[in-house]
Image (spheres, helix red, strand yellow):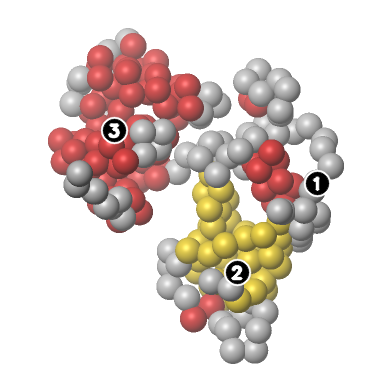
Amino acid sequence: MEIIAKPNIKALEQKAINFALLGKWKDAIKINKEIIDFEPENVRALTRMGLANLQLKDFKEAEKLFKKALKLDPINSIVKKNLELAKTHKVEKLVGAETSKKLVKEPGTSTEEKISITGSRVFAESFVKGDGLLYKLNKTSANIYKDDKLIGIIESPLVLKLHQAKELKIKVTVEFSHGKEKEAVLLFRAEKAIFKASKQDVKPYMKKDSLDEDEENTEEE
């Protein structure tokens, strides 16, 4: 039996976004489908593919994709809005910055955090944008690692969100975004909207395990 290697999802995502920014919607659909074939619950790819179908006025397919994305991420306002457009057979033409906003940024699924880099021989210039990092949760902080080397510590409200994401089994990844000398900005990405969702938005969908409920933090196992 032939084993198919998983592609570089980040590279495919950037390619899909680039096609969309150029208005090449059929090419964008093709690339997003490649992502979904390997990650069926990738909300970002489902949303982008839905938007591409919407631009091509394939309202039935767009509606199907938005419904699936909304089931995975019930508080995603971009998906909600575009699902209504698909249902009513309306199209919002995406141009320039507006295209980028709708395709790249999704409310609550990503956030940036600044850290001070530890270690005498480690600087922001030691990394390149997109370098994957690891984090380990403590009770009130999170250690950030590159491979097995500690590069910094986070002590901010973000730690609580990471604990809550862990409790809800929501995957959160972290990567290097940019920085200078001993200061670095990290980009955290979550599978679902957890970072900026308000209580009013979250509660109807997460009654028992709300991200806003108080809970006792536990150390990462």
**Percent of width and height locating residue 64:** 32, 18
Q: Which kind of residue does numbered mark 3 sit on?
A: Met
**Percent of width and height locating residue 129:** 43, 67
Between 93 and 128, which is closer to the camera in this rendering?
A: 128
According to the picture, the residue beneath numbered tag 3 turns out to be 49
Q: Which kind of residue does numbered mark 1 sit on?
A: Asn
* Left or right position of 215 against 176: right
Q: Residues within 10 Å of mark 1 (few under 14, many from 20)?
A: some
* Left or right position of 47 against 212: left
Q: Work out which residue is located at the far front of the displayed protein and give it.
A: 1
Q: Quadrant of residue 41?
A: top left
Can residue 21 be seen in this snapshot?
no
**Percent of width and height locating residue 141:** 76, 59
Can residue 178 be seen in this snapshot?
yes
User: Disc 2 and disc 1: Cα gap in Å?
Assistant: 21 Å
According to the picture, the residue beneath numbered tag 1 turns out to be 217
According to the picture, the residue beneath numbered tag 2 turns out to be 145
SS of the residue at dot 1?
loop
Which of discs 2 and 3 lies nearer the camera? The answer is 2
Q: Which kind of residue does numbered mark 2 sit on?
A: Tyr
Q: State whether residue 191 is above or below residue 113.
A: above
- Of labels 2 and 3, earlier in sequence is 3
- What number of labels is visible? 3
SS of the residue at dot 3?
helix
Quarter of the image with the N terminus in it: top left
* Left or right position of 51 against 24: right
